[in-house]
Structure formats: structure tokens, C-alpha cells
Image (tube, rainbow, N blue to C red):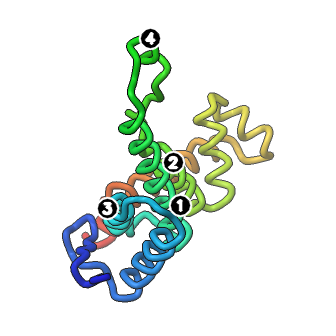
Amino acid sequence: MAWDAIKLHTEDGLPVSKTDRETILDVAEQVILGSEHDPKYVFRAAQRVSRNLHLIESLRGYAKRAMIAAGDRAARDQKLKDKPVRRREMDQLPDLSHRDDIENRVLIRELLESLPALDREILLRKVSGETGPDIDREMNLKPRTSESRFRAAKTALQQIFFKTPDIDKRSRAR
């Protein structure tokens, strides 16, 4: 297969590094050879993986899950194309509007794992609805610590996800 023809670019449009490209294409080859799925789905998944490189810590693991999910989607799509649908079965068809749920879950998990354990715990508790004072009391923290750690964790996730410059670095440079 002509692997050179496959274009892998980061979110900024720059070509991925040689080692990342080799890793992504190695995983793609394993998935294609290990299944009977249409390779175009796997290649599209490889391109999505390369666009999310700035968010991924475990490239091989993320790429493998994303490409296997793409292959499974291909098989499911083919099965739906091959099967004639009766009008009364229309309500029973799977909802395919959430195709990237697995990839998004993996990406969120990787983003959360990039946070320190304390910040991650506080963030998850805040998101689940606990109040700052309750978190401080249950985790034996000083008053308002959870609120400041929550803001710091939220800012860190935004900087990673949206690639915003570090505000602290900008203010120190002045």
C-alpha cells in the first residue's frame, strides 16, 4: 500500500512528525489487516487522530481505539446498506448521529488525566454539583481552596483544548 499518499496534518495544517506518522500508520495497518473493513474509514480516523495530536497523551492507544471504532462503524453502515428496511422497522434503527461519542469520551478522559489528581477530583466533584465549602470540608482543604483549584483546572483544560496562550506568562512578560 502507498502510505506516502496518505496526508496526515495537525489541526494547524502542518504535517505530523515522522514518529507520530509512523505510529498512526502502523496502527492503521494493523487495524486494516486485522479486519475486513473498508480502509477509507480507517484512513479518515487516522486523519482525525492527527488533527487531535495536541490533545492526546497516549497516541498508540487513542489511535487504535479510534480506528477500531471507525472500522466497526464501517461494518455497521455496510450492514444497514445491505439490509432492506421495512417501514415498521424505521423506529428501531440505531441513532447514528452520535458516531464520535467513543472518540470524544477517550479524548475527555485523556484531558482529565492531564490534570493533577487533586484538581481532577475537585473538578469532577464541582461538575457533579457539590459546592465549594462541601468539597473543602470533605477533602480537608483550607476554605475556598476548591474554588481556586476548580478555576485553575478549568483554565488549564481550556488552554489545552483551545490552545489559548497562558495568561500568567503574558502578564509576567509586561
User: Sequence order check: which comes first, mark 3 or mark 1?
Assistant: 3
Position in image of residue 93 (x %, y %): 46, 25
User: Sequence order check: which comes first, mark 4 or mark 3?
Assistant: 3
Q: Residue flagged by tag 4: what amino acid is it?
A: Arg
Q: Residue at x 38, y 68 (%)?
A: 54
Q: Measure the C-alpha gap from mark 2 to mark 1.
A: 8 Å
Q: Measure the C-alpha gap from mark 4 to mark 3.
A: 32 Å
Q: Residues within 10 Å of mark 2 (few under 14, many from 20)?
A: some
Q: Which mark is residue 40?
A: 3
In the image, is residue 146 above or below residue 90? Answer: below
Q: Are marks 2 and 1 in contact (CB under 8 Å)?
A: yes
Which element type, helix, strand or loop, lies under badge 4? helix
Q: Residue furthest top?
A: 88
Q: Residue at x 42, y 76 (%)?
A: 24
Which element type, helix, strand or loop, lies under badge 2? helix
Q: Measure the C-alpha gap from mark 4 to mark 2.
A: 29 Å
- Quarter of the image where the C terminus is located: bottom left
Q: Residue flagged by tag 3: what amino acid is it?
A: Lys
- The answer to which image quadrant residue 113 occupies is bottom right
Q: Measure the C-alpha gap from mark 1 to mark 4.
A: 34 Å
Q: Measure the C-alpha gap from mark 3 to mark 2.
A: 19 Å
Q: Residue flagged by tag 2: what amino acid is it?
A: Ile
- Is residue 173 or residue 128 the one in the foreground? 128
Q: Which residue is mark 1?
A: 65
- Horizontal side of residue 67 vs 149, given as left or right: left
- Horizontal side of residue 165 vs 62, given as left or right: left
Mark 4 vs mark 3, foreground winner is 4
Q: Which residue is mark 2?
A: 102
- The answer to which image quadrant residue 42 occupies is bottom left
Q: Measure the C-alpha gap from mark 3 to mark 1.
A: 16 Å
